[in-house]
Each structure stands twice: as structure tokens, then as C-alpha cells.
Amino acid sequence: MIYDTPDAWRRAPDKRVTFFGMSGLGKTHLAQILRAQGDWFHYSIDYRIGTAYMGEYINDELKRHAMTVPYLARLLRSDSIHVGANMSFSNLSPLSTYLGKPGDPAKGGLPIEEYARRQALHERAEINALLDTPAFITRAREIYGYGNFVCDTGGSIVEVVDPDDPDDQVMATLARHTLPVWIEGRPDHADTLIARFTRDPKPMCYRPGFLQHHWDRIGGPDTDPDSFMRETYAAAIEAREPRYAKMARWGVKVSSADVEQVRDADDVVALVAEAIARHRAGT
């Protein structure tokens, strides 16, 4: 680890940390607390995916829909209007909407082949965005003067790494340049996370084999897209937890309960220092 003791972390003039774990457990919350202090650069992986790597696909899809409206089509053809997604750290709806849901088209679903194609685009984009982390550390320092850096990963990071490979490119890169911190959920979080996902779906990336398995089990052309996504997300929560635990080998872990108690940047620094101390003690 780049900070091998709590004191090394506390004294570091440039603190660099990566938070990872299931969506909804506080990664972005911690990153926003640090950014609000004023001397931390917040690198959002989902925002990077949606703007740098998926933005063109998202905007083209918006234009396809706009072209079905004659009034808008005429204006688009003459370059009289601009149609594009308004992506932000706190609003990833354009990306989630583009990725869509497989199932009955009459209920807003996509054919499974198209859904899988978009998933493949997202997987490649997620890997690229994660591997961009060192470049953004340099960019944050050289352009904006930020030494402190927080990488706010998406919950889908677990789908694009091999937690059994100690030389996994993504995790090895993150660990060389930041301290990876796993936010571990509680067993009773599952229902809360499923309900939150149902209300406000986050961008999801599923391993191809996992997706195909669940489509073969419960999917079909008449499948209700919302029901499929709820069941598949619930299955993903269970499947991802042991994978996250293996990923913690590259860093340290904190509990979501402790994250809920954090109120300011000093609390975040203390949270990570305590995690390093527990890691050194083997607890």
C-alpha cells in the first residue's frame, strides 16, 4: 500500500484514495465531502464514462429520438438546435437511460442483443476510465494545483476486474497510485439498495456470463424490463460481495455504518487512518 501506517497517511502532503463498493453505500458522499473542503480533486468514474467514453453514443440516441419528431428533425438537419445529455456527478440518468433494460419493447425494453451490445460498450468504457486515474492525478496537480485526490468508482468496478488475479491491471494501477478503500455493506442493506435502485437506477455493468445466465433463467421477449432489472440487481448484490472482499487485498476496508457517521473531511481522513491501523493489526 502507498500508505503503510496511519501516520504515513495522516502526514502525506498529497493524499490519494480510491473508494469502491456497492452503489449506494457512500462512495460519492465521501468524495463530495472531501471536494467541499476545497483542496481535493474529485474524479468520478461514472461521470468520466458518461462524458468521455459514452457521451457520443448517448447523444446519438437522443438525436435518433428527436428525429422522429418532424418539428425537431427539421431543426436538427439545419443545425439550428443542439441535442445533448446534461451529465453531472449527481445526475447519471443519461447514462442509465442509454444502457436501458432488456425485455418487452412495449414496456420500454430493449432486445437482449442490443442490451448486451451496450453493456459491452460500458465495460470497455469503465476499464478505460479506471485506467485514466493516474493521468487525472497528474492533471489535477499540474492544471488545478490539487495534490489530494479521490477516485469515486462506480459499483460496477467489480465486474471489470479479476479479483483472483494479483496482477489485475485495473486494481494494480489503482493500488500503485492511490489507496483502495472498500466500503463494506451490511447484510440488511440489500433490501434498501434494491429499493433505491428501483427508484433511481444507477449505471449497471454485468459480466456477460452473469447477464446471459439470468436472461436464460427469467428473461424472454415478453419479460417486464423493470422486473428483470430488479431481480438481476438483487442477484448481483449477492454475487458481488465476495468479489469485493477479494479486491480488498489491494487496500483496506471500512464499514458502511462508519461511513454514515462521517460529517467532514477530517472525519474521512480519520476513517481511512483507522482502516489502515486495523489492516496492520490483521483485524
Image (cartoon, rainbow, N blue to C red):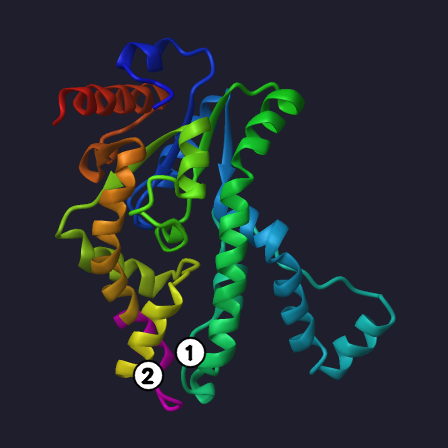
Task: Answer above or below: position of 123 versus 149.
Answer: below
Residue 149: give x, y in percent of width and height: 48, 26
85 or 99: nearer the viewer: 99
Task: Answer above or below: position of 242 versus 236.
Answer: above
How many residues crowd mark 2 within 10 Å: few (<14), some (14–19), many (20+)?
Answer: some
- Magenta includes 234? no
Task: Answer above or below: position of 22 versus 73.
Answer: above
> Disc 1 on helix, strand or loop?
loop
- Magenta includes 223? yes
Q: Residue at x 63, y 23 (%)?
A: 144
* Residue annotated with mark 2: 219
Residue 33: give x, y in percent of width and height: 40, 30
Going by the picture, which residue comes out furthest to the right?
78
Asked where in the image residue 73 lies, by quadrant, the reply is bottom right
Q: Amino acid at mark 2?
A: Gly
* Residue annotated with mark 1: 102
Asked whether, in this view, residue 13 is left or right of residue 55, the answer is left
**Image quadrant where one finds the C terminus:** top left
> Disc 2 on helix, strand or loop?
loop
Q: Residue at x 18, y 52 (%)?
A: 189
Q: Are marks 2 and 1 in contact (CB under 8 Å)?
A: yes
79 or 242: nearer the viewer: 242
How many residues crowd mark 1 within 10 Å: few (<14), some (14–19), many (20+)?
Answer: many
Sequence-wise first label, 2 or 1: 1
Magenta stretch in the rendered image: 219-231
